[in-house]
Amino acid sequence: MRSLRVLSGVLLATTMMPVVMAAVLADVEIPSDEASLQRGAQLATSVCLGCHGFKYLRFGNLQALGFSDEQFDSLRAGQDLDAALDSYTPADVARDLYGVVPPDLSLMAKAREGGPHHVYTLLTSYYTDESGVTDNHLLPGVRMPDVLGYSSAATPGERTELERQALDVVAFLSWAADPKVEQRERLGYFVLGYLVLFAALLYVLKRRIWARLG
């Protein structure tokens, strides 16, 4: 579960760094499958809400991710379906702790240049230098520690697992930024189909009218 804590610190850290050094963002495919989104939602609700909120997201929205009734009840922990995913930490307390109120995550995948690739790159850019100091290639000097433990991954297998967890987080962030995109796409296909059918009917009607006039 230690990897679950990383998102809160990561996104808080991005607001506390005055300058973002130029870096190449990881060219990875952000997953959108149900399993990744569910794992990402579990990370977000169990850990990230400790510091951050998703003010534009309601617990009822999470039902669209395909959770079973038991999983969903555990996820929302008694919260009303219409309740926003607010941070568990009051803003004034967070300001005292961090010097700044941690940002809302609802639109984080769209708000930052590079979107989810920026967050993924940040999560997987920690390293330990020759003096034993942990730093980050994307945000040198970032205050957030390497809670994910990426810099200490000893084997390719460990790094692969940590990268998968980072992908789950950014997958959920991408979905949270526009949770109804699939519904709009389905509606779009329906509307296009309706327009094609309507145009075909108009064409047939036109042919019949001109046939009578002729």
Image (tube, grey):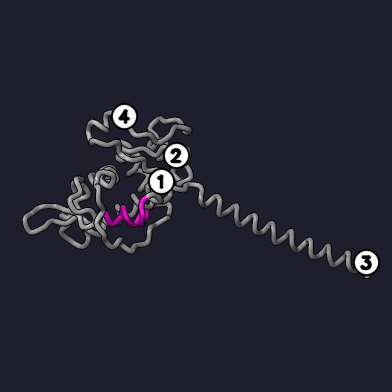
Q: Secondary structure at mark 3?
A: helix
Direction from residue 177 to residue 186 in the image, left or right: right
At a point 26% along the width and 61% down the height, the residue shown is: 23
Looking at marks 3 and 4 on the same chain, the residue that comes earlier in the sequence is marked by 4
Tell me residue 57's x, y (percent): 44, 39
At a point 22% along the width and 33% down the height, the residue shown is: 97
Residue sitting at the far left: 131
Give residue 193's quadrant in the image. Answer: bottom right
Neighbor class of circle 3 (other Cα within 10 Å; few <14, some 14-19, many 20+) is few
Amino acid type indicated by mark 3: Arg
Tag 2 residue: 56
Q: Observer-nearest residue: 168 or 112?
A: 112
At a point 8% along the width and 54% down the height, the residue shown is: 132
Q: Observer-nearest residue: 155 or 92?
A: 92
Q: Could you say which disc has been placed on residue 107 in the image?
A: 1
What is the C-alpha distance between the residues marked 3 and 2?
58 Å
Tag 4 residue: 90
Looking at marks 3 and 1 on the same chain, the residue that comes earlier in the sequence is marked by 1
Amino acid type indicated by mark 4: Pro
Tell me residue 158's x, y (percent): 21, 57
Range of magenta residues:
112-123
Tag 3 residue: 212
